[in-house]
Image (cartoon, helix red, strand yellow):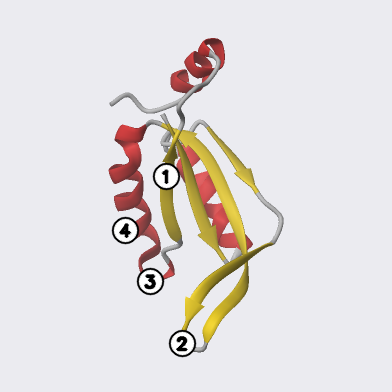
Amino acid sequence: MMSLQVVSENIVLLQEVADFLLEEGLVANALLSNESEYRFHGESGIESKKVFLLKCISKSLLFSLINERLREKYGDRMPLVYSEPIIMIDPEQRDDLLARLTKV
């Protein structure tokens, strides 16, 4: 299992992404954050911008499909997408989450 992370400056885009992934059965749930500060090394040194974060739980095997579907749907508006492994989770909650996901 994985925690899918999707980052964008556009909260409306992330809401749309969350609904799309949920409707397709590609994620089990979606959590949208409040505005956060995203820091990076830019042309003029350390820069920052305000972004929003969408976190979802899914199967690691679905990452490539999720990325492909988002790239097709959003093209040049594609948000930053990455995942982190879920190392431990309550077995009953895991089974409930897996039941909501597309079979691989």
- What's the distance in space between the residues labelled 2 and 3, CA to CA? 21 Å
Check disc 2 and report the residue beneath it.
43
Q: Along the polypeptide, which appears first: circle 4 or circle 2? A: 2
> x%, y% of residue 32?
64, 48
Residue drawn 45% across the image and 62% down it: 79
Element at badge 2?
A: loop
Element at badge 1?
A: strand
From where the camera sits, is residue 6 visible? Answer: yes
- What's the distance in space between the residues labelled 1 and 4, CA to CA? 19 Å
Does the residue at mark 4 contact the one at mark 2 (Cβ under 8 Å)?
no
> Outermost residue, front direction?
45
Identified by mark 4, the residue type is Glu
Residue drawn 51% across the image and 12% down it: 91
- Closer-to-camera residue (99/88): 88
Identified by mark 1, the residue type is Ser
Identified by mark 2, the residue type is Glu
Element at badge 3?
A: helix
